[in-house]
Amino acid sequence: MNRKTVAVLPGDGIGPEVLDAALPVIEALGLPLDLEFGDIGWECWRAEGNPVPDRTWDLIGRSDAVLLGATTSKPRREALAELAPELRESAPQYLSPIIQLRQRLDLFANLRPVENYLGGGTPYRFCVVRENTEGLYAGLDWNHVPDGMWPLVAEHPNVRRSGRPGSTAGIRLQTSHGLDRILRFAFETARAHGHERVTLADKPNVLRQSSAYVLERLEAIAADYPEIPFEVLNVDAVALWMARRPERFGVIVAENMFGDILSDLGGGVMGGLGLAPSANIGEKGNYFEPVHGSAPAMAGRGRANPAAAFLTIGLMLEHLGLQDAAGSIQDAVRHVTRRRDRVTYDLGGSATTTEAAQAVLDACREVPQAPTAAIVTIGDELLRGDLEDSNAGNASRMLGERGVPVRVRHTIGDDEATIADAIRPSIGRDDVIVVMGGLGPTSDDVTRSAVARALARPLEHREEAWQGVVERLTRFGVAIHDDNRRQALFAEGADLLPNPNGTAWGCRAEAQGSTVVMLPGPPRECLPMLAAVLRDGLPHLPEPPEVTCVFRRTLGIIEADAAALVDELVRDSGVPVKPAYHWHYPYVDIRLGCPPEAADDLAGRLDAALADHLVTDRDRTAVQELAVLLDARGLVLDLDDRLTDGVFAAELARERDTSDGAGALGVALSGVRQGGDGTSYTGTIALTCTVRDTTGEPTAPHTGEHPHEHTYELTIPNRGPEVTTYCAQFAAWSLVRHLTGRHPKPMEESA
Ligand code: IPM
Ligand code: MN
């Protein structure tokens, strides 16, 4: 393809930052476009008395497309006040740059697509085609009714009371030239984008004459598009239905002001102007612009959502004949907005403009995003607590092992609307949605209708499932009730999942990129069925990456400090690592999921970073580790333990296989409380454990008074009686370190 020139006009406010963030997509997709940057907007007005300087018009004139960031418009008085002093003399009029572009280039069609980018709920995709050159924007707008018009309005009762100086007027101008081309554009758009119908949003019940003419033109143009149905609705009703049932619309065509209002409403329906792109198109030119405007209060803060800018670039690419690239950008935006992993504040995230843009760029380059799952377990008995919800945990584990970690889990009673409400937001957002329970034959089991409702599909009878039910009941000599027929009802078009262990079959259905899996509640029925789906039924999901888990149990360090150390070493390691922390008094466990080949190196770094706190690399307590060592070496303790009042000795005895040994280790455990006592949860306790080892050669260097002695110390928060547990584990840990040669450093060295 020939290279095309794009005039990029970043403009004001957040315009430059959203374009900066989104423009790299052009290079990422390797598109044959040359970008030329130009000036437009408020700075041009202030300095030059013209928000669209001549050089910018020249640039526009030699470009194939114009990409605009945003421009600021201010009311007349403010505009004049900000003008450079030397320009005030000539008193130029500020005219919004976009209005100038629309008028001078005769950009009659303003296309504003609306789509369910956030996923969840019913999918919808429609667009507002707004007339851009006439209607109330025709410039026929008067403060004081002009002479020629006066006779027309003078008799209005309110005008009689207000007089001429107190009356204003504007004209909704519509012409056959203007109407025919916008209506034709609407039908062409419906055809090109596969929209099912064209809706004219007008006001025929009040603006009876002009609306009748518009309808006349609509019928004339529609005759050329016999395959596309059309309708006329009052604009207020369109507003209502757009909010209530956006999926009923295809192309909504409207005159300028109605279209202006409806397209902002469309932005609201889809979750904010941060997702709203626009194309302004005419015979002689075009410009493409996010609908959000310059948002001066937000400028320079890195908060603006770049999605609208990406989608706007997509519209531009489509116009330039680069349909595939446009499609990739839309897919990438959909992908990111549905997951909402890396999105800006307006979509509930905390990503900056650049981070959110990077997510879209990654998705364009098909850098895979981690898949996610949702689980919905159903049954009043789960909510009452009569039955432990073991399915949720088991399904989580199975999905996690398949490389589809669970993002959200709901437990819902047997209520159809609530179940459907829980499923809906995951459709189009989670890769797998597992719904379990509520498939029995009785009327209080409503899951099958809830799933159908969430999928917006009717229920249908499935003979093969029915035969399965009949066969099974007959085999067990159970009478068949009419109610059993319910168990053969499934959302239309679903794939059935036979149940080898029960009558309730399950099903799976694909919707907006999500696989919805519906399963019966009894664990021995649903878990094997889920295993089969995970094994054979998710070919569209990548195989889970191989992950090794490096495990370390630590003592004497708080979770946040451990996390800070880990963060640093993960950063330095240069491999993808997923850390997880688990605090269970008195331990903090650290698990680092990493690629198998990186595990050794990572473990080495972790041990070095945590050297002073390391207890074990196994899921054992220090007391358990000590018991193993003492058993292996045939040792007993000569214990001075008033601190734990025998708790340490008792715990140790429980873990040991034998109670005797040849050698004895002298152990003195003591603690000094500061600012608290054995009943209060305040202050600290300084623990000391001195190990005197006469079983072998003296170990140098020693830290106690005696050549065979090592002293271990730790100061911990005083948690009253609970601290006893800590003391016992500390004593055991000290002994483990002693026996494995991990002695503390002598005083002078550690100072
Ligand atoms: C839009 C804007 C403009 C309009 C303003 C800024 C002139 O609201 O593009 O929708 O009313 O057309
Ligand atoms: Mn607007």
Image: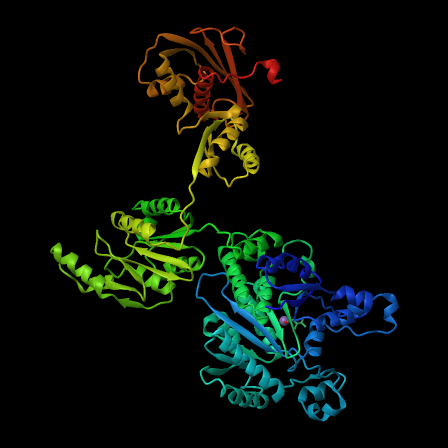
Image spot of residue 617 (x, y percent): 43, 28
Quarter of the displayed picture in which ligand 2 can be seen: bottom right
Q: Residue at x 43, y 14 (%)?
A: 641
Q: Could you tell whether 514 is left or right of 300 in the image?
A: left
User: 56 or 339, which lies in front?
Assistant: 56
Say if 212 sits above or below 92 in the image: below
Q: How many marks?
A: 0
Q: Quadrant of residue 460?
A: bottom left
Residue plotted at (72% across, 93% down): 151
Vertical side of 411 occupied by 102: above or below: below
Q: Which quadrant of the view contains residue 103? A: bottom right
Which of the two residues, 81 or 330, is positioned nearer the viewer here? Answer: 330
On the rendered image, what quadrant is the N terminus found in? bottom right
Rendered-image quadrant of the C terminus: top right
Report whether 467 appears left or right of 230: left
Query: In the picture provided, is 335 more to the left or to the right than 42?
Result: left
Establish if 576 lies above or below 501: above
**Coordinates of residue 202 in the picture (x, y in percent):** 55, 82
Q: Position of residue 310 (x, y in %)?
A: 59, 62
Q: Residue furthest left?
A: 477
Q: Position of residue 540 (x, y in %)?
A: 40, 55
**Which of the 4 image quadrants contains residue 493?**
bottom left
Report the residue that reaches farthest toward the front: 2
> What residue is drawn where x is 62% and y is 78%?
257
Q: Is residue 305 visible?
A: no
**Residue 244 visible at all:** yes
